[in-house]
């Protein structure tokens, strides 16, 4: 499942998109209820020239995480708890 603006990674990521955050939450529930069918969540940054290459690298890479925020300073971020915000820092 792909979203954009559903989670934050850095302080400069800006405001979350409520609709995208809801989709992210739905994806997390689906992953818990149907783990054998679940492919994962990827939150995309705004479009840029190498987004396709970074997305391909995440999809082709090891499956250590099922939730990743892609493209913040050129890398992916797995989920980490942070008080007060849904964050992937």
Image (tube, rainbow, N blue to C red):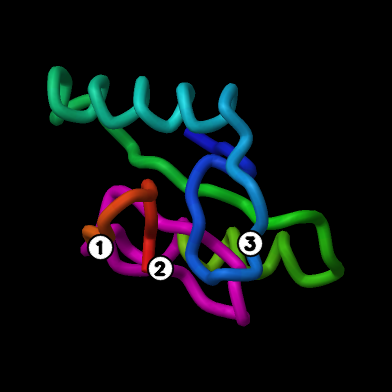
Q: Is residue 79 magenta?
A: yes
Nearest to the eye among marks 2 and 1: give it: 1
Q: Name the residue under label 1.
A: 80
Residue 60 or residue 40, whichever sits in front:
40
The residue at the point 14 percent across, 29 percent down is: 35
SS of the residue under disc 3:
helix
Q: Mark 3 points at which residue?
A: 13
From the viewer's perspective, is residue 51 above or below residue 24?
A: below
The residue at the point 22 percent across, 29 percent down is: 31
**Extreme residue in the front direction:** 84
How far apart marks 2 and 1 lie (CA) works out to: 9 Å
Question: Looking at the picture, how far across and down is residue 65, in whole percent?
Answer: 25, 58
**Extreme residue in the right direction:** 49
From the viewer's perspective, is residue 66 above or below residue 22?
A: below
Nearest to the eye among marks 3 and 2: give it: 3
Q: Earlier in the sequence, mark 3 or mark 2?
A: 3
SS of the residue under disc 2:
strand
Q: Is residue 3 magenta?
A: no
Magenta region: 59-80
Q: Residues within 10 Å of mark 1 (few under 14, many from 20)?
A: few
SS of the residue under disc 1:
loop
The residue at the point 36 percent across, 20 percent down is: 26
Find residue 63 and report its image quarter.
bottom left
The residue at the point 52 percent across, 77 percent down is: 75
Residue 35 or residue 26, whichever sits in front:
26
In the rendering, which numbered label is found on residue 29? Answer: none
Q: Do the residues labelled 2 and 1 touch (CB within 8 Å)?
A: yes
Q: Mark 2 points at which residue?
A: 77
Q: Earlier in the sequence, mark 3 or mark 1?
A: 3
Question: Looking at the picture, how far across and down is residue 73, in whole percent?
Answer: 61, 81
How far apart marks 3 and 1 lie (CA) works out to: 16 Å
Question: Looking at the picture, how far across and down is residue 61, in whole percent?
Answer: 39, 68
């Amino acid at each position: 499942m792909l979203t954009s603006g559903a989670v934050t990674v850095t302080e400069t990521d800006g405001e979350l998109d409520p609709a995208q955050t809801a989709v992210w939450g739905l994806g997390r529930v689906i992953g818990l209820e149907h783990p054998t069918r679940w492919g994962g969540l990827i939150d995309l940054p705004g479009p840029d020239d190498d987004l396709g290459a970074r997305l391909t690298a995440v999809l082709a890479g090891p499956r250590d995480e099922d939730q990743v925020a892609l493209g913040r300073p050129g890398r992916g971020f797995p989920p980490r708890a942070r008080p007060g915000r849904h964050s992937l820092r």
